[in-house]
């Protein structure tokens, strides 16, 4: 295996690990939102900050790019629009 292919394999493995962590945090956050009884707005803000901070700390610890640390916010925003915002008929 060439050195380039080796680095590519390592990068894919690392990307999967990081993506799994992000997906875990997102799943936890949306499970929190969907629980019964519904959380208050303040509880949602607190949980969002906790999860966002956890992701940012993970990114720093793993020396990930600053743009990667913004993925949590982007994915929450996308899913929020898709799941919770009323669409006009």
Image (tube, grey):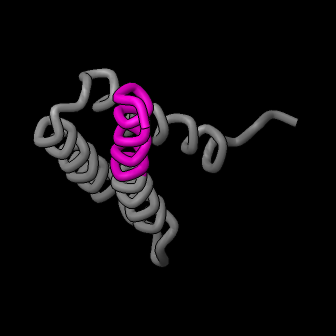
37 relative to 89 in the view: left or right:
left
Q: Residue at x 35, y 32 (%)?
A: 7
Number of residue marks? 0
Q: Residue at x 60, y 38 (%)?
A: 81
Q: How far across and down, in percent of the image, does residue 59 sit?
A: 21, 38
Furthest residue to the right?
89
Q: How far across and down, in percent of the image, does residue 20 sit?
A: 41, 55
| Residue nearest the observer in this picture, 49 or 38 | 49
Q: Residue at x 13, y 35 (%)?
A: 60
| Residue 17 lies in the magenta stretch | yes
| Residue nearest the observer in this picture, 10 or 76 | 10
Furthest residue to the front?
1
The quadrant of the picture occupied by the N terminus is top left
The quadrant of the picture occupied by the C terminus is top right
Q: Residue at x 29, y 59 (%)?
A: 43
| Residue nearest the observer in this picture, 75 or 47 | 75
Relative height, residue 59 to residue 37 (above, below) = above
| Residue 12 lies in the magenta stretch | yes
Q: How far across and down, in percent of the image, does residue 44 sit?
A: 34, 54
Q: How far across and down, in percent of the image, does residue 27 sit?
A: 45, 61
Furthest residue to the bottom?
36
Instruction: Give the magenta part as a residue range.
Output: 1-19
Magenta span: chief secondary structure: helix
């Amino acid at each position: 295996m060439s050195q380039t292919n080796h680095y590519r394999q390592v990068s894919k493995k690392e990307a999967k690990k990081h993506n799994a962590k992000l997906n875990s945090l997102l799943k936890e956050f949306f499970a929190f939102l969907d629980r019964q009884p519904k959380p208050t707005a303040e509880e949602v803000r607190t949980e969002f900050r906790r999860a966002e901070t956890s992701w940012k700390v993970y990114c720093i610890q793993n020396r990930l790019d600053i743009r990667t640390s913004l993925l949590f916010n982007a994915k929450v925003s996308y899913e929020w629009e898709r799941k919770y915002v009323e669409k006009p008929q």
